[in-house]
């Protein structure tokens, strides 16, 4: 069995996997339930949604990971080591894997390479602005975001590093890491630089053939494996693009949406979907550690930490 640990409201990303007859037995468990547990089923546990955890829950999840590992459970994505957006996008250019950088909103300096865009460090709802081309535009965008209620500490500035795959068409590439395996995933095509989801009817057969070749050959696997290692992420999906002939990693999501198979008018794209889905499930089956007798978490250690955390938060609110 594989159990994914997720936050409230974020089970839909894995529903397709849970229902797939070819998949190993997969279940979802909320962090609240984990942190109250005295017993745990023997399974492979994947710590997902790490960027959605508050600072107390993140620390308690990290203690849970260590305790579960000590008890002999198979655990993936150590919450204490996973780098989320800001830390990751700072580390990748230092390692020579990205050619763009990220800055907190209070780090504006002459080394920033324009154009840039403004977004929240947490969440996955896309940029707050279009491309910004000078310091004045950036400062105005930050002021607008803060005056609209977005905390300054949650604002980041990201240098733009993308180029069209065909005139006017941009492509976002993706790949999963599942244990030791990198699985190429489906790409998205859109008119315009911001590619979050695909634009129906935009890509033609040439782009679909190119996508299928990438899925078959997996040419970026070694580069991406290094990025996942730097991120401390053993299960997740990297979203990336090609800029001036080099891979540029935009983010790594520890609870990516997985859509499975769905109808498409292109036979080439249907073949790509089947290939991606089959390789994903194959790697997931390797991750499955089977079952066995439940294990006991001794002395309610995690529960006591959770109580202390709740007391701390309530004390701060009433101070």
Image (cartoon, helix red, strand yellow):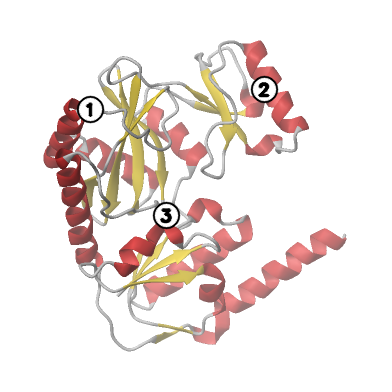
- The residue depicted at 44 percent of the width and 67 percent of the height is 65
Quarter holding the C terminus?
bottom right
First along the sequence among labels 3 and 2 = 2
Vertical comparison of 287 with 133: above or below? below
Check disc 1 and report the residue beneath it.
204
Q: Quadrant of residue 88?
A: top left
Most foreground residue, 292 or 191: 191
First along the sequence among labels 1 and 2 = 2
Residue 218 showing in the rendered view: no
Is mark 3 in CB contact (under 8 Å) with mark 1? no
Rendered image: mark on residue 135: none
- The residue depicted at 41 percent of the width and 31 percent of the height is 195
* Side of 146 relative to 116 (left or right): right
* Side of 60 relative to 294 (left or right): right
Circle 1 — which element?
loop
Q: CA distance from mark 1 to mark 2?
A: 36 Å
Circle 3 — which element?
loop
Measured as percent of width and height from the top left, residue 89 is found at: 45, 34
First along the sequence among labels 3 and 1 = 1
Check disc 2 and report the residue beneath it.
141
Check disc 3 and report the residue beneath it.
255
């Amino acid at each position: 069995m594989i159990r994914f640990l997720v936050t409230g409201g974020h089970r839909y990303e894995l529903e397709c996997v849970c229902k797939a007859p070819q998949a190993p037995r997969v279940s979802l468990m909320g962090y609240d339930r984990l942190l109250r547990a005295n017993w745990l089923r023997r399974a492979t546990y994947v710590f997902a949604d790490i960027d959605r955890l508050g600072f107390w829950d993140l620390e308690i999840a990290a203690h849970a990971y260590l305790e579960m590992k000590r008890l002999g459970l198979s655990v993936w994505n150590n919450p204490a080591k996973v780098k989320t957006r800001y830390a990751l996008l700072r580390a990748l250019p230092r390692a020579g894997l990205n050619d763009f950088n990220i800055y907190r909103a209070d780090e504006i300096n002459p080394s920033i390479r324009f154009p840039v865009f403004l977004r929240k460090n947490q969440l996955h709802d896309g940029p707050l602005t279009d491309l910004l081309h000078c310091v004045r535009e950036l400062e105005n965008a930050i002021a607008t975001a803060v005056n609209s209620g977005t905390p300054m500490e949650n604002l980041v500035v990201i240098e733009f590093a993308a180029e069209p795959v065909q005139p006017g068409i941009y492509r976002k590439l993706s790949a999963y890491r599942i244990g030791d395996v990198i699985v190429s995933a489906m790409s998205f095509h859109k008119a315009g630089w911001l590619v979050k989801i695909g634009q129906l009817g935009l890509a033609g057969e040439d782009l679909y053939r190119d996508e299928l070749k990438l899925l078959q050959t997996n040419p970026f696997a070694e580069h991406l494996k290094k990025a996942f290692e730097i991120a401390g992420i053993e299960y997740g999906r990297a979203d990336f693009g090609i800029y001036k002939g080099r891979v540029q990693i935009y983010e790594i999501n520890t609870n990516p949406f997985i859509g499975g198979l769905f109808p498409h008018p292109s036979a080439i794209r249907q073949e790509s979907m089947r290939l991606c889905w089959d390789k994903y499930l194959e790697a997931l089956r390797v991750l499955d550690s089977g079952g066995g007798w439940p294990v006991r978490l001794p002395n309610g250690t995690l529960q006591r930490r959770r109580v202390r955390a709740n007391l701390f938060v309530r004390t701060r609110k009433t101070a």
